[in-house]
Amino acid sequence: MLKHTSNKEGPHGLTPSKEQIAYNHQHNGFDLDFDDFINRDYQEESYDAIFSVGDLL
């Protein structure tokens, strides 16, 4: 992600997984929020890029 955004402080992330939030807090410290990123209301031009990692069932 850093390679694509050039943001050395880390990109902002969203996850529907409380386990990912806990792991991130313990190991990485990235700016990560627990949220429903699929049904979330996004303001126009609120993100430079959106990446999805993993499978959605």
Image (tube, rainbow, N blue to C red):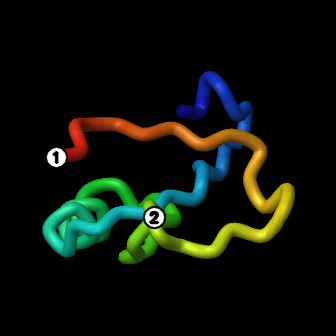
Return the x and y of residue 29 as percentages of the image width and height: 41, 62
Label 1 Cα neighbours within 10 Å, binned few <14 / some 14-19 / many ≥20: few
Give left or right: position of 30 versus 48: left
Quadrant in the picture for residue 38? bottom left
Q: Residue at horizontal 35%, vertical 63%? A: 15
Name the amino acid, label 1. Leu
Name the amino acid, label 2. Phe
Quadrant in the picture for residue 18? bottom left
The image quadrant where one finds the N terminus is top right
Query: Which residue carries the number 2 mark?
Result: 37
Cα distance between the residues tagged 1 and 2: 14 Å
Quadrant in the picture for residue 22? bottom left
Secondary element under disc 2, as helix, strand or loop, is: loop
Give left or right: position of 38 versus 44: left
Return the x and y of residue 4 as percentages of the image width and height: 65, 25
Q: Residue at horizontal 45%, vertical 64%? A: 37
Return the x and y of residue 33 as percentages of the image width and height: 44, 73
Residue 33 against residue 2 in the figure, above or below: below
Q: Earlier in the sequence, mark 1 or mark 2?
A: 2
- Along the line of sight, which residue is nearer the eye, 11 or 34? 34
Residue 13 against residue 19 in the figure, above or below: above
Q: Residue at horizontal 59%, vertical 49%? A: 10
Q: Residue furthest right?
A: 45
Label 2 Cα neighbours within 10 Å, binned few <14 / some 14-19 / many ≥20: some
Query: Which residue carries the number 1 mark?
Result: 57
Q: Please state the total of marks drawn on the protein image.
A: 2
Question: Which is in the foreground here, disc 1 or disc 2?
Answer: 1
Secondary element under disc 1, as helix, strand or loop, is: loop
Marker disc for residue 43: none
Q: Residue furthest top?
A: 3
